[in-house]
């Protein structure tokens, strides 16, 4: 008599292996190198993909279940926030401008991250790395969606959010985050992971998310806090992928060390430049402050990052080249950036303002060595001008850095009174840079960076006018026509906060005058 065959149940570890690496096969009709052309051309040598430690340790079915639960909770909070008119509970309407910056500049990066991880998930020969990249790709798509859904509620009531995806592709300050990610996903798969998973997610992500999310919490925005937490809970997996990828490359072959070091130098600096926008948001755009950019830098970069690079020293990795300059910049970049946006907010899709007396006091306390000495007098001057002559906007477009695409607003290391300019010549053309580090990135791969889409150049070349405008004679106000091309509603999305619809609507809805600091007194 035949005994019934009992199906053996796999243990957790075997089941996991069967459902991840077990799905891999070597191709036979075509050689593996032809099917996976990208995982060798960067020069990274991998001898044994089996040494890759899976950072996520999740099977796909467990992943869906887990993420589904999180989404249910998140959407319950977002719904009740909307039903209770939660937007009226924020500290004051200036806070909304931090959300505008987020939906314009950060949320589209989630979608870019999604695309990038899909791409590298296809390109690695190792199944472990492919599975990890695929899961992160889905995470990032979810982040794009939940952020868009959460912030869409604010879009019903406030200006500056209605065309965020279009702006991301066109507006001058959004070329900074856009070019960062386009640079990353036009690199090879190992460079992409070093850029996004390691330099960004592992080293710098706390400096992006913590200021926005604790800023939201302090300013009464539970909706943003909730999507922030929902996204951050994926972050531990993403950070693990970042550190695993770095260690894997370094352990596989000593010839990988200099390649990885150059990527770390490059991507630390590009990430740091991108964070200028966050530094400004943190020090100037939150009516209720959490901590200064300088304090955040000291906590998340200097102490955490310092320990990390000590740990990586055993592989022959040193701290990124731009590290010391970035640490010096903690005293300056938020003030320099806000001063720039103040001058150009007629051409931006969010509002700026002069900080109130109380806020300036806070800034001098947090920046005892620099704020009063270098920056306060600018705001005092503009404030006086505003009362006398009306709000002043700079009509001359600035020179941009060819690599980070930030306007030339950063100063020389060691001398905060001198704007830093660098230039290189390539094939008879001159290119400009904000720093030694951006210049060095260019000089290593000039053929890549001569292609940078520089918003100011594009405007002056006549590529940013609506179809009904002749670029050779755009009329009496070229800037107005450029704004029309951008889809920015002049007088609504842009300009000073004190005269904005956002401000007057918000005080009407709340039935009282805007709080201290938000006024044009
Ligand atoms: Fe994300
Ligand atoms: Zn630069």
Image: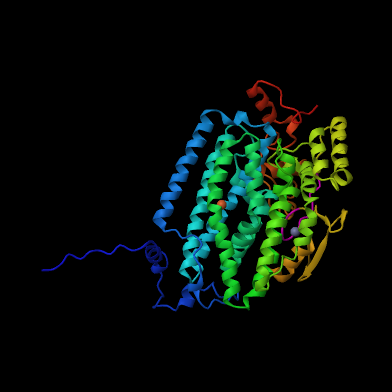
Q: Does residue 433 appear in this view?
A: no
Q: Could you say which is closer to the camera, residue 445 or residue 464? A: 445
**Residue occupying the point 28% across, 64% down:** 8
Find ligand 2 in the image and state its quadrant: bottom right
Is residue 18 magenta-colored? no
Left of 270 or right of it: where is 412? right
Residue 435 position, x and y percent, is 79, 61
Left of 15 or right of it: where is 432? right
Q: Could you say which is closer to the camera, residue 236 or residue 419? A: 236
Residue 86 position, x and y percent, is 57, 30
Write down the quadrant of residue 5 in the picture.
bottom left
Residue 19 position, x and y percent, is 38, 63
Q: What stretch of residues is rendered in magenta?
A: 395-406
Residue sitting at the far top: 511
**Residue occupying the point 68% across, 61% down:** 307
Q: Main secondary structure of the magenta part?
A: loop
- Is 477 located above or below residue 18 in the figure? above
Left of 121 or right of it: where is 472? right
Q: Does residue 273 appear in this view?
A: yes
């Amino acid at each position: 008599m035949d005994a019934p065959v009992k199906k053996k149940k796999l243990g957790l570890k075997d089941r996991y292996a069967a459902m991840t690496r077990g799905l891999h096969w070597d191709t036979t009709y075509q050689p593996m190198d032809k099917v996976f052309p990208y995982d060798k051309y960067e020069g990274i040598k991998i001898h044994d993909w089996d040494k890759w430690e899976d950072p996520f340790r999740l099977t796909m079915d467990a992943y869906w279940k887990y993420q589904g639960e999180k989404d249910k909770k998140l959407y319950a909070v977002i719904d009740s926030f909307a039903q209770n008119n939660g937007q009226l509970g924020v500290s004051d309407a200036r806070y909304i401008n931090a959300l505008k910056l987020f939906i314009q500049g950060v949320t589209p990066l989630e979608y870019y991250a999604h695309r990038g991880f899909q791409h590298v998930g296809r390109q690695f020969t190792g199944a472990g790395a492919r599975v990890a990249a695929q899961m992160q790709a889905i995470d990032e798509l979810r982040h794009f969606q939940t952020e868009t859904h959460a912030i869409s509620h604010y879009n019903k009531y406030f200006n500056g959010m209605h065309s965020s995806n279009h702006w991301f592709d066109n507006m001058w300050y959004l070329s900074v985050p856009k070019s960062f990610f386009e640079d990353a996903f036009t690199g090879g798969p190992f460079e992409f992971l070093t850029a996004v998973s390691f330099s960004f997610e592992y080293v710098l992500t706390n400096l992006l998310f913590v200021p926005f999310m604790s800023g939201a919490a302090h300013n009464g925005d539970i909706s943003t806090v909730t999507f922030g937490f929902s996204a951050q809970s994926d972050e531990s997996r993403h950070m693990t992928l970042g550190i695993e990828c770095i260690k894997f490359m370094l352990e596989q072959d000593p010839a990988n060390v200099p390649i990885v070091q150059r990527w770390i130098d490059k991507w630390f600096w590009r990430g740091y430049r991108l964070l200028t926008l966050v530094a400004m948001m943190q020090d100037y755009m939150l009516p209720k402050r959490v901590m200064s950019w300088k304090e955040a830098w000291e906590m998340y970069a200097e102490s955490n990052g310092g320990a990390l690079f000590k740990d990586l020293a055993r592989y022959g990795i040193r701290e990124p080249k731009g590290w010391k300059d970035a640490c010096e910049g903690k005293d300056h970049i938020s003030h320099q950036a806000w001063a720039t946006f103040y001058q150009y907010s007629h051409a931006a899709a969010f509002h700026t303002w002069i900080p109130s007396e109380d806020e300036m006091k806070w800034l001098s306390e947090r920046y005892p060595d620099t704020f009063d000495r270098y920056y306060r007098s600018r705001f005092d001057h503009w404030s006086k001008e505003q009362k006398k002559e009306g709000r002043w906007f700079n009509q001359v477009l600035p020179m941009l850095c060819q690599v980070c695409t930030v306007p030339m607003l950063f100063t020389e290391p060691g001398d905060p009174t001198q704007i830093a300019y660098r230039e290189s010549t390539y094939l008879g053309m001159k290119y400009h840079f904000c720093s030694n580090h951006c210049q060095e990135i260019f000089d290593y791969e000039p053929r890549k960076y001569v292609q940078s889409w520089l918003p100011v150049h594009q405007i002056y070349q006549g590529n940013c006018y609506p179809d009904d405008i002749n670029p050779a004679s755009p009329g009496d106000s070229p800037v107005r026509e450029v704004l029309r091309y951008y889809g920015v509603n002049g007088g609504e999305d842009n300009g000073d906060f004190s005269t904005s619809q956002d401000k007057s609507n918000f005080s009407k809805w709340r039935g009282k005058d805007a709080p201290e600091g938000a006024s044009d007194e």
